[in-house]
Image (cartoon, helix red, strand yellow):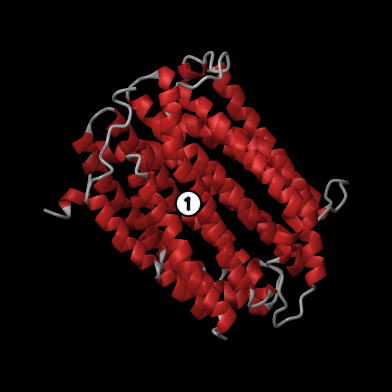
Amino acid sequence: MFMRSLIGDRAFYRRLFTVMLPILTQNLITNFVNLLDNVMVGQVGTEPMSGVAIVNQLLFVFNLCIFGGLAGAGIFTAQFYGKSDNKGVADSFRGKLYIALGVLAVAFFVFIGFGERLILAFIHEGQENLDMAATLGYGKDYLRVMLLQLLPFAVMQIYASTLRETGETLLPMKAGIVAVLVNLTGNYILIFGKLGAPALGVVGAAIATVLSRYVECLIVVLWTHTHKQRCSYIAGVYTSLRIPAELAKKIAVMGLPLLVNELLWAGGMTVLNQCYSIRGLEVVSAINISTAVSNLFFCAFISMGNTVAIMVGQLLGAGKLEEAVDEDRKLIAFAVALCAAVGVVMALLAPAIPQIYNTTDTVKRLAEELLFVIAVFMPVHGFNNACFFTLRSGGKTLITFVFDSVYIWVLCIPLAFCLSRFTAVPILPMYITVQLLDLVKVAMGFVLVKKRMWVKNLVKDE
């Protein structure tokens, strides 16, 4: 009986795959091209790869701040759409504009004023005497160009997230496919100097990424404004930038914890990687490889998280609370099963993938070991991520703040800091020990979802 409650009918899986597959496809294509990008830069050498990896870790914080900042308004977008309230969707869209502008302003200030110091924090001498000065130079060159992609990335996320929350998942996927093709082609031409272009190395990789961001942004924005019948909320969205005060307050109350959560979580992951980097530049390179590869497999639980947010959020907004509980339980079960299967594939491929990189045997071996550890923990990540988005769909953003940020800063970072600074524990046991703390989140997520405190219609009075 319990197992039957975890399995849906054909109609449920039809809805699930309708929402999930376009998101999964876009994420897979994007991360596959990012992996190829990573491999291409890795062909230039270990130091360029390390410099790019450090900057991408810093930009990761910005990306998640955008995601987290927009997610607060996105909770209302999904529920307004479930209620068929176009004005509400337009108001929440405007809220996203203000949030993105604020995140952009802070990001430019930090990266322009403190970029070099942030890169230096990751550069430490290791076993193989890699060139630390060259790594810093590559990182600075890459960051200077990558600053140009912050604006189109933010604008694209405003539109794409709204499209997904209102049921239009195919267009962002198609735009993503075009963008990654532009990025891949640009990488090939500009990194290695093909078709008469100069060989620009890491700068070429950055230029290709910037071009792809603008292409993706233009496709999403232009399509939305030329399909007003399907995106009726966009008509006149810029005639006024006013947001109802009560809604603005609610977005702030729910959105601020999400923004701070993503900032602290992404910052926490960056600090964790900085702790790992104490063991040397070869560790930075190995983690870069394992991260680029594992991100491809992480698409499974990331797409499921977005699916949970959309499907459960729409049901809550429509007032179908018990149906939301039932579907959420089945979505979490599917997420765990999917991630377990993906983890098996990842473990089988772990020995082969690092071999395609032009780096040292030490880096390859360590990357393989890290990939195997990540594969083992895939079902754990799937469960935790589905629980996080369940809580968020019902507006429990303060709880998700504790679930993510408090967890990483109170448990993971102090442990990694002490192990890296005060012991001689090698990187692999240190990494496994920190990963084991995710089991604490499993217990937290199970209890919080079971209590049903997230089962709430947030827009019934709007």
Question: Where 158 sits versus 232, above or below?
Answer: below
Left or right, 61 with respect to 397, comes to right
Measured from the top left, where is residue 46 in percent x and y? Answer: 73, 69
Residue 439 sits above or below residue 422 on the image: above
Q: Quadrant of residue 103?
A: top right
Q: Residue at x 34, y 44 (%)?
A: 396
Q: Residue at x 50, y 71 (%)?
A: 414
Q: Position of residue 305 (x, y in %)?
A: 40, 47
For badge 1, the amino acid type reads: Cys
Answer with left or right where residue 304 lies relative to residue 419.
left
Q: Is residue 433 visible?
A: yes
Q: How many marks?
A: 1
Instruction: Please tell me which residue lies in front, 231 or 344.
Output: 231
Disc 1 element: helix
Is residue 398 left or right of 299 when viewed as pictured?
left
- Identified at 54% across, 55% down, the residue is 266
Residue 122 at x, y = what percent? 68, 67
Instruction: Choose between 110 and 229: the one closer to the eye.
Output: 110
- Image coordinates of residue 226 in percent, x first then y, are 57, 17
For the point 47% across and 55% down, the residue is 298
Residue 248 lies left or right of residue 445; in this view the side is: right
Q: Quadrant of residue 402?
A: bottom left
Front-most of 257 and 54? 257
* Residue at the disc numbered 1: 299
Q: Nearer the viewer, residue 227 or 156?
A: 156
Q: Could you tell me if residue 347 is visible in this image?
A: no
